[in-house]
Image (cartoon, rainbow, N blue to C red):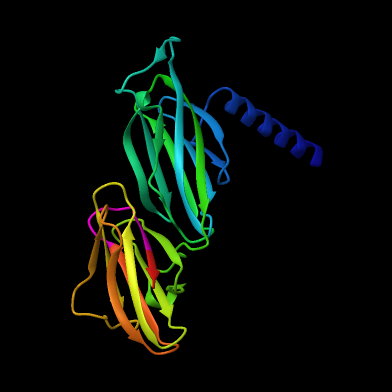
Amino acid sequence: MRKFKKVLLTAAALFAAITITGGVKASAADYNIGVNQEVKGSFTGNDSNTYNFKAPGKGYFHIEVYFEGGVHENGRTVTGTNVTFKTQMKSEYKNYWNDNWIGLSEQKAVSPNYCFRAGQPISLTLSSNWSDVTFSYKLKVVYTKDKYFDKENNGTAGKATSIKKKKTYSGIITDGSDVDWFVFKAPKAGKYRFMAVNTEEKHCWTAFTPYISKYKKGFSKAYVAAYAGDGWQNIITVKLKKGQKYYIKVAKGYTDNASYKIKVK
């Protein structure tokens, strides 16, 4: 009986191997990759490839895809802006970098910068709009380490990223629902000036709101808007007692993926 079961299992494994090598594909191919690791891939027509990785801590990342070419099933090299790649980046059932019109002639596609909590699972799926073309590419998740970066998940005052005087901290507002909180604890009694700058190259602004506690604003205005290209902006200057905490809430203006810096003087 054991010998008969062994024969059945062997036959099943052989059938599976023949099915795969014969080109029958039940679902998209999945691969696990690391950050700063360049991988090569290809797919044909309506197939797709999905790459899974974990969000790094203490910094941010972006994705680069280099297109190495497309070959039609008749052997002809394919070029032109009408031949497009599609990207779909997801994390915890939420869509992020979704671009359906990356022309093959562009040769390279670069995602916005992202910052998630350390270890958060992320997937990137590449596909195309041409059913009879084999596409080849290189892919890399580029990670930049920065210990003075906002630490996700800091979306509430209770989980605010701690900042110190005379240090510059960076962050990214990933999308319209993303919020970053920072907290400063005065090392001694005195005046402290909170400043911020929008570091994006595209036209956008980011909202900075001071709080004297986790729930009470530090002024009557809704926020201070920091526009790209305007340089450092004064958020507020306050008198604090030794050990007193002060909070800054950072939120989206009208453009997703807004990068910024914040400091206390």
Name above or below for residue 53 compared with residue 209: above
**Residue 48 seen in this snapshot:** no
* Residue 250 image point, x, y percent: 32, 66
Q: Could you tell whether 10 is left or right of 176 in the image?
A: right
Q: Give the residue displayed 45% in from the left and 21% down from the top.
A: 69
Q: Give the residue displayed 38% in from the left and 71% down from the top.
A: 181
Please identify the quadrant where the C terminus is shown.
bottom left
Please identify the quadrant where the N terminus is shown.
top right
- Viewer-proximal residue, 82 or 160? 160
Q: Is residue 226 magenta?
A: no
- Viewer-proximal residue, 32 or 232? 232
Magenta stretch?
A: 252-261
* Residue 173 image point, x, y percent: 35, 58
**Residue 183 seen in this snapshot:** yes
Q: Give the residue displayed 68% in from the left and 29% down from the top.
A: 14
> Quick one: which residue is furthest to the left in this view?
221
Q: Give the residue displayed 40% in from the left and 83% down from the top.
A: 245
Name above or below for residue 160 compared with residue 96: below
Give the number of callouts: 0
- Viewer-proximal residue, 36 or 247? 247
| Residue 15 picture quarter | top right
* Residue 137 image point, x, y percent: 48, 28
Q: Is residue 255 magenta?
A: yes
